[in-house]
């Protein structure tokens, strides 16, 4: 599918150049299906979405552990699991994979993907209402967390 999109893009550029007398105008390449925010951010649990948001602001494993009320080792496991799902090994690579997707996706679509978590949950955590979503990530204290 990617190769077909690239061929189509190249053809569009050739046709555009022929129509414009070989002008140097370049058309932006199409967005690959794999690069769409909905695809990049799909397949994660609500807790993992919370961790991804925290990683994008450079939170440490200690910060993640404190916020999610888990041990630092468990936070490391969450980070490694997310990295594995992306096929990368470093948290910086996770950030590179997700930061643009988080910027581009609208809040309603993100809430659907994350099962209720707003895309600005981490940014607004310490502000009014940020902690209102803890039940989605931490649970309700009786084993009903994600």
Image (tube, rainbow, N blue to C red):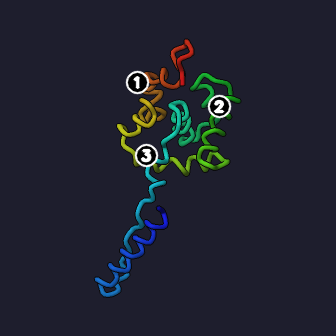
Q: Nearer the viewer, mark 1 or mark 2?
A: 2
Residue 129 vs residue 116, the one in the foreground: 116
Measured as percent of width and height from the top left, residue 1 is found at 47, 61
Residue 139 vs residue 11, the one in the foreground: 11
Numbered disc 2: secondary structure: helix
Counting residues from the start of the chain, the first of labels 1 and 2 encountered is 2
Measured as percent of width and height from the top left, residue 56 is found at 54, 42
Gap in Å between the C-alphas at discs 1 and 2?
A: 24 Å
Q: Residues within 10 Å of mark 2 (few under 14, many from 20)?
A: many
Can you identify the residue that label 3 sits on?
Answer: 38
Numbered disc 3: secondary structure: helix
Q: Are marks 1 and 2 in contact (CB under 8 Å)?
A: no
Measured as percent of width and height from the top left, residue 57 is found at 54, 41
Q: Which mark is residue 75?
A: 2
Gap in Å between the C-alphas at discs 1 and 3?
A: 25 Å
Measured as percent of width and height from the top left, residue 44 is found at 53, 37
Counting residues from the start of the chain, the first of labels 3 and 2 encountered is 3
Q: Residues within 10 Å of mark 1 (few under 14, many from 20)?
A: few
Residue 1 vs residue 49, the one in the foreground: 1
Counting residues from the start of the chain, the first of labels 1 and 3 encountered is 3
- Residue placed at 44% from the left, 72% from the top? 7
Can you identify the residue that label 1 sits on?
Answer: 129
Question: Which image quadrant is residue 24 in?
Answer: bottom left
Question: Which image quadrant is residue 30 in?
Answer: bottom left
Gap in Å between the C-alphas at discs 3 and 2?
A: 24 Å
Q: Is residue 17 left or right of residue 6?
A: left
């Amino acid at each position: 599918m990617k190769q077909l999109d690239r061929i189509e893009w190249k053809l569009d550029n050739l046709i555009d150049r022929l129509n414009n007398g070989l002008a140097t105008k370049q058309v932006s390449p199409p967005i690959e299906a794999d690069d769409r925010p909905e695809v990049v951010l799909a397949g994660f649990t609500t807790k993992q979405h919370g961790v991804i948001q925290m990683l994008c602001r450079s939170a440490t494993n200690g910060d993640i552990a404190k916020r999610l009320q888990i041990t630092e080792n468990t936070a490391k496991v969450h980070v490694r699991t997310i990295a594995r799902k992306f096929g990368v090994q470093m948290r910086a690579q996770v950030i590179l994979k997700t930061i643009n997707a988080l910027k581009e996706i609208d809040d309603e679509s993100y809430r659907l993907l994350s099962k209720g978590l707003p895309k600005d949950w981490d940014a607004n955590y310490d502000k009014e209402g940020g902690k209102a979503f803890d039940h989605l990530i931490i649970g309700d204290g009786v084993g009903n967390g994600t």
